[in-house]
Amino acid sequence: MVYGLAYSYGQFFEPMAQTFRAGDGAASVVFSITTLLGFGLSAVTGPVADRVGPRTMLIISAACLGTGLHFTAISDALWQAYLAYGLGVGLGVGCTYVPVVAAIGRWFDRYRTLATGAVVTGVGIGTVLSSPLSAWMVTHFGWRHSYEYYAIGGAALLLLAASLVARPPQQPASVVDTRPPAAHGFRTLYLATLLVCVVNYVPFAHLGPSALRLGIDAVTAATLVSAIGISSIAGRLLIAALAGRFGSLALFKGCHVGIALGSLVWMTAGGYGGLLAFAIIHGAMYGGYSALIPVVLAEQFGLERLGRLLGLLFTALGAGSAVGAPLVGYLVESTGGYMAALTALTVLGLLGASIAMSYRERTSL
């Protein structure tokens, strides 16, 4: 629910920009604030969830999401939308993903990779459903009424999830990680994550608008984000299933490379077919990458500090995603096209991938 709403922002991008008479760069900042807070606040919500459990966090998420979308719908200026949508949806994301994923990591021992991959397919399913639904709703009801409907429905579904989720068992003392913290290794993963996430979340804000520039209608353009969602579901499950054979860390590094090189496909796309190919490739790599983050952290640094380290790493996701969307927006606005922006994304992504490849696996517990 939360990610479906956050990642469907591309369908609200153009009508909101027209309403507030804002350029591509300024309108992109709404999405950037959302991802910055959603991922960045995980450094706080992760440790808090370790203490209070995921149910409390989901209740807070429902309140923030509903309130934020309501005030976005009644905003009279772009800065009000920055605050309402950015804080509301951003806090909703921050109180959901890391607390839930960290809890899953504690519920499973033998099948942790597969379980995590299955749970985070919710991100892909939400993306698949919300993007075309949002395009249809905006066309028929306008963006303001659409956000009002999402405020009610989103909060209700999150409260339902809160009523069903259980607190995970505590980690037995016998399996506590006794290795040194290996701060250098974590810094390497952090920097790689920061750079690759400048690339990773741009399509959710800009793939639809780039399709419109090629003359593709709004509803068809929205299916591209849905294609990312569908492909991410397959990527999460398939890559999670392959982790036992090839190793989680090796596949994690491979996803970094795939995300970086995918920008080249977007850059050379001349129509819907090329954009669809990019959406499929990016979705698979993004999905596998997302599913493997908590698994790699658990394997490399232990379960005891999983919530805290996952939250810290997500500040890199937040910073990277906050830079990517407005960077592309301002480059498109200043150059009149996507070539310079996608070239910059490819360079940054490849730099992040090279740093990820340099990481060396820690010894066993």
Image (tube, rainbow, N blue to C red):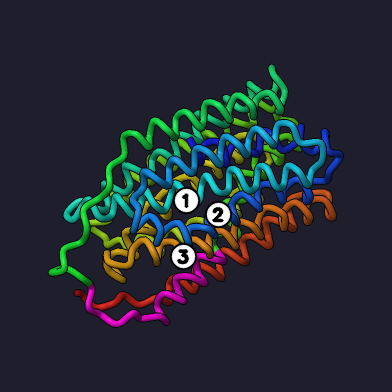
For badge 3, the amino acid type reads Leu
* In this rendering, position of residue 196 left or right of residue 296: right
What's the CA distance linking mark 3 and mark 2? 15 Å
**In this orientation, which residue lies closer to the viewer: 89 or 220?**
89
- Occupied quadrant, residue 214: top right
Helix, strand or loop for disc 3: helix
Dot 2: element: helix
Please, what is the three-letter code of the amino acid marked with disc 1? Answer: Tyr
Q: CB of mark 1 within 8 Å of CB of mark 2?
A: yes
Q: Overall secondary structure of the magenta stretch?
A: helix
Give the magenta part as a residue range.
Answer: 177-195
Q: Earlier in the sequence, mark 1 or mark 2?
A: 2
Q: Badge 2 is on which residue? A: 200
Precedes in sequence: disc 3 or disc 1: 1
Identify the residue shown where x is 48% and y is 63%.
43
Specify few, some or many for label 3: CA neighbours under 10 Å numbering under 14, 14-19, or 20 or more: many
Which x, y percent locates residue 143? 71, 28
Q: Which residue is mark 1?
A: 286
Instruction: Pinpoint residue 27: horizontal percent, then vertical percent.
Output: 76, 45
